[in-house]
Image (tube, rainbow, N blue to C red):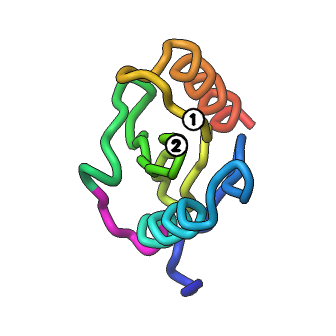
Amino acid sequence: MNMSDKPLVWLHGEVKTPPFSSAARIEAGYLLRLIQAGENLSLPQSRPMPSIGARCHELRINDETATWRLIYRIDEDAIIILEVFSKKTQQTSKKVIDVCKKRIKDYDNA
C-alpha cells in the first residue's frame, strides 16, 4: 500500500473464503485497492448509491453461486465499508439502505 492510498475502515462485514469463492475474494480485493488508490470505478464494477448518502457506492462482485455487494463511502481520509451482503433481488432492500444510513450517522458522530 502506498502512503497516499486511503485505508479501509470496515464498519461491518468482511471478504473471506468462505462464503466468497477464492476468485471473488481476489476480485473484491483488487477493486478495493483501485478505490484506495483514488480510481473512480463505474458500471459494471461500481455504481453510486445516492439513496444511502453522498459519496456512497455499491461495489459489484459476481461469484460462482452468489452476487455480492459491498456498500462503501469515499471519504477524504479513508474508504468506509458499510455493508457486505449477498444480493438476491434487482433492487437493494430498504433494510440494507437503512442500516447503511445508520452506520454512516454513527460513524460521523463518533
- Main SS of residues in magenta: loop
Q: Position of residue 62 (x, y in %)?
A: 44, 50
Return the residue at label 1: 86
- SS of the residue at dot 2? strand
- SS of the residue at dot 1? strand
Q: Residue at x 60, y 32 (%)?
A: 104
In the image, is residue 38 part of the stretch drawn in magenta?
Answer: yes
Return the residue at label 2: 68
> Is 37 placed left or right of 108 in the picture?
left
Quadrant of the image for the N terminus? bottom right
Q: Position of residue 64 (x, y in %)?
A: 51, 51
Q: Badge 2, how many Cα within 10 Å: few under 14, some, many 20+?
A: many
71 versus 33 height, above or below? above
In the image, is residue 25 part of the stretch drawn in magenta?
Answer: no
> Is 41 placed left or right of 79 in the picture?
left
In this view, the residue in front, 102 or 18, is 18
Quadrant of the image for the C terminus? top right
Q: Badge 1, how many Cα within 10 Å: few under 14, some, many 20+?
A: some
Magenta span covers which residues? 36-41
Residue most extreme to the front: 65
Do residues under tags 2 and 1 come within 8 Å of each other at their CB atoms? yes
Q: Residue at x 52, y 43 (%)?
A: 68
> Is 59 placed left or right of 108 in the picture?
left
> Is 39 placed left or right of 80 in the picture?
left
Q: Earlier in the sequence, mark 2 or mark 1?
A: 2
Q: Residue flagged by tag 2: what amino acid is it?
A: Trp
Q: Residue flagged by tag 1: what amino acid is it?
A: Ser
